[in-house]
Image (cartoon, grey):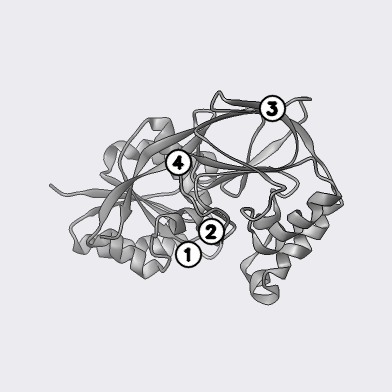
Amino acid sequence: MTKTFGVFFNGNSGDGKGEQIAEHLHKLLKKQHISYVPITGKDADDAIEKVKETLPQIDALVIIGGDGSINLAITAIIRANADLPVAIVPAGTINNFAKRYNIPLNVDESLRLISGQHSTRRVGIAVCNKNKAIVSSLTFGNLADISNEVRQEEKRKYGKMVYLLKAMKHIGKNKSFEIRFSLDNNFDEVMKTWFALITTTKSIGGHVYDDSTPEAMHISLLHNIGLRQVLPYLFFAITGHLKDSKSIARFEAKHAVIKSVNNETVQTRIDGDESINLPIQIEYKRNRIELFVDN
């Protein structure tokens, strides 16, 4: 029986990189007698709908792109309540999700993996408000934009000092929010939150910040910001490391309800893109996705 792979890519990319990779993959799949269905959309919502519509027709879904593109495709799987193998061709700037599961970062190597010998493993993600995937991270607060503001060319030119430059720009804002965190029915507290980071991986912005990889979400909070917290903040900005700071509250949870106490508008970023406003409910879904991996 001939297999059919759906291949999702960002057709709006200015350099056309995703489409070029998809066309190359098409040739490789053809040699293996695997049918190919290209999937793209005019915008994020359209892309999610296009993936949903295609899911019943395919045996596996290939996602070309970074964490943002993976998010759209996995969100479509969540909303369709589907379960099928997923393959990743890392083509983003950071690729946290691919790094977490040792997907080859070289495009040619990842294409060979998909079209050739591979195995699969079940991996976990988180789901926000029951209909939005979190494949790598959810952030909000004063630091939420730093990693996303830093571009590859800036990192090459300035090194890790670029994080310090961005951080100094944010210190003056000094904006915190009264946030209630209810975690796993055993923690319920209001915290004056300057920055919140929730991840399903052990790295953010390309930095490994936690050595453990539990079957749960990592939650790191910088709160009650004052003079004593400035140095830990700058340490994060320069290195990306949270694990060495005692000034940052850290938790692990499988379920979280997060609300703004004063009904202020607090916008999150999910997998690098602007997303849902608080309040939110997040649940960790263990083994939710079947992922192509190297043998």
Q: Which residue is mark 4?
A: 125
Q: Quadrant of residue 52?
A: top left
* Label at residue 129: none
Q: Look at the numbered disc 1 and give the secondary structure of its residue.
A: helix
Asked whether, in this view, residue 53 is left or right of residue 4, the answer is right
Mark 3 or 1: in front is 3
* Label at residue 17: 1
Horizontal and vertical percent for residue 22? Answer: 38, 60
Horizontal and vertical percent for residue 218? Answer: 55, 43
At label 3, the amino acid type is Glu
* Label at residue 189: 3
At label 2, the amino acid type is Ser
* Mark pair 3, 2: CA separation: 43 Å
Q: Is residue 232 above or below residue 265?
A: below
Asked whether, in this view, residue 157 is left or right of residue 9, the answer is right
Q: Look at the numbered disc 2 and give the secondary structure of its residue.
A: loop
Quick one: label 3, few (<14), some, or many (20+) residues within 10 Å?
Answer: few
At label 1, the amino acid type is Lys
Mark 3 or 2: in front is 3
